[in-house]
Image (cartoon, rainbow, N blue to C red):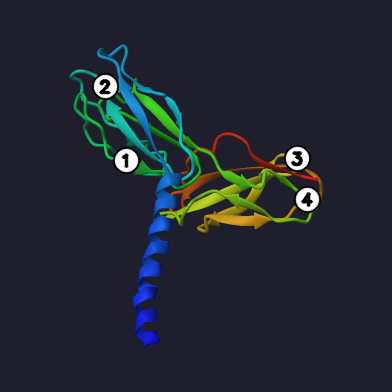
Amino acid sequence: MRRPVMRGLMPAVALAITMVLAFQASALAATDTVQMVGNSISTFAFSPKLAKAKLGDSVQWQNTSTATPHTATNDTTDPWTFDTGILSGGATSASFAFTAAGTFTYHCNIHPTIMMGSIGVPMKVSPASGSVGSPFKIQWATTAPPAGLVFDVQKKDPGGTFQPWQTGVTVPFMRFTPTVAGTYQFRADVRNASSGVTSGFSPGKAQFTAH
């Protein structure tokens, strides 16, 4: 009699856990909006021009102009591809997930010389401080990159300069154990493994202090 009860309960428990995890993931991720502003060619712009999104967030574009169409299209010098297509006045694009750290540049295909912007996605480092000899989590993505792309991560030791730490990796994070006290900083970009085209490095200070 007990065995059928257990078989009936286990899928329900698994479903409940899955729903909780999905809810937590959706609660952590957010959708940020960049506006396409201006009603004359002299005032067309992305606002903010230099936008920032948290690792794993999505970005959508909203055309607030009355009649002029625009696009938000990644630059050919940037390996992270996204394109809203033509958005008429008042339209909002689909959202595009930024699951990797870096600075990703884009433009309007209709007004490429006057409408330019970027999305800066910082890395995550945890904890913010700890003991020498303890591991720290260094995260530059929430998942593996799209096919053909890799991550390059640089590290700055206390009193030093940025130097390559992880080159051409596809894992989203690693753990680092410091051997001397001080502040360590990290930055990352995304690179097309075939063409060599890279995004800009991630903005801000992804760092921890070992003591």
What residue appears at the point 71 percent right and 39 percent down from the top-left corner? 161
What residue appears at the point 42 percent right and 45 percent down from the top-left corner? 27
Label 1 to label 2: alpha-carbon separation:
16 Å
Q: Is residue 83 left or right of residue 23?
A: left
Q: Are marks 1 and 4 in contact (CB under 8 Å)?
A: no
**Above or below, 180 relative to 14:** above
Q: Is residue 188 left or right of residue 147?
A: right
Label 1 to label 3: alpha-carbon separation:
39 Å
Q: Earlier in the sequence, mark 1 or mark 3?
A: 1
In the image, 155 versus 178, the foreground residue is: 178
Label 3 to label 4: alpha-carbon separation:
20 Å
In the image, 185 versus 110, the foreground residue is: 185
Q: Nearer the viewer, mark 2 or mark 4?
A: 4
Q: Which residue is mark 4?
A: 131
Q: Which mark is residue 160?
A: 3
Q: Earlier in the sequence, mark 3 or mark 4?
A: 4
What residue appears at the point 57 percent right and 50 percent down from the top-left corner? 139
The answer to whether one can see residue 211 in this image is yes
Residue type, numbered disc 2: Thr
Label 2 to label 4: alpha-carbon separation:
50 Å
Q: Nearer the viewer, mark 3 or mark 4?
A: 4
Q: Is residue 209 left or right of residue 45?
A: right
Q: Which residue is mark 2?
A: 64
Q: Which residue is mark 1?
A: 95
- Under tag 4, what secondary structure? loop
Label 2 to label 3: alpha-carbon separation:
46 Å
- Under tag 1, what secondary structure? loop
